[in-house]
Amino acid sequence: MKKLILVLGLLGVIVSCKPKQQLVSTTVDRKSQVAMKGSWTLTSVSFPGSEYFKVTSFEVADAKCFEGSTWEFVSNNDTGKMALTKSGCPAYASDFKWYVTKEQQVVLKFLNEGDKARKVTSGYILALGNQTLESFQLTDVVQVGNNKAKVVYQFKKNNSK
């Protein structure tokens, strides 16, 4: 019963995030998800094929403020933590729920303190690409005026000691 509620809750996230976007399945790609397990640093944010433009990532801060942010992905319970650490940017930290679909899309739901994941009905769908043991990219497509542009978030695995 809990799994059914979780699947229905995650489907609600997919529908409410980008309703004009084709729905993604809730079938999890465990291999890709397990490969993301661990501690990561978001090393760069780029806008391929476009001039720099101002993008507020995840409704939190300017996309460039995410450079140097730390991310922890826990694959066995689909949870995580992230924190912005860049000087001159707002201090921000959040827990999140996440999973990778068979279509290589990462679904993220940021949680405010006290939020229950199943009650959060909005989130983000990003394309997973160039995944190796040491790095991966998440790509978002944003509306800029009348055009669409890509925002690429490059992650590098932190060495464990």
Image (cartoon, rainbow, N blue to C red):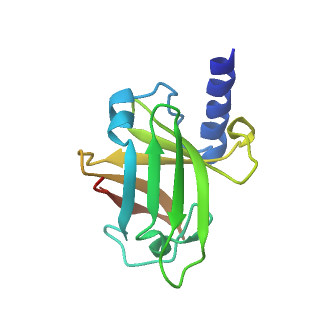
Q: Quadrant of the C terminus?
A: bottom left
Foreground: 69 or 19? 69
Residue 66, placed above or below residue 157: below
Foreground: 158 or 36? 158
Q: Tell me the residue at 75%/39% (across/down).
A: 119
Q: Tell me the residue at 46%/51% (across/down).
A: 72
Q: Is residue 76 found left or right of 135 in the rendered image?
A: right
Measuring from the top left, give residue 61's x and y in whole percent.
58, 72
Residue 77, placed above or below residue 109: above
Q: Tell me the residue at 47%/24% (across/down).
A: 27
The image quarter in which residue 104 lies: top left
Foreground: 150 or 156? 156
The image quarter in which residue 71 lies: bottom left
Foreground: 8 or 69? 69
Q: Tell me the residue at 57%/60% (across/down).
A: 58
Q: Is residue 137 found left or right of 117 in the rendered image?
A: left
Q: Quadrant of the N terminus?
A: top right
Measuring from the top left, give residue 28's x and y in whole percent.
45, 27
Hey, which residue is sitting farthest bottom in the picture? 88
Measuring from the top left, give residue 63's x and y in whole percent.
49, 70
Hey, which residue is sitting farthest front in the picture? 161
Count of labels in the image: 0
Measuring from the top left, give residue 151's x and y in whole percent.
41, 63
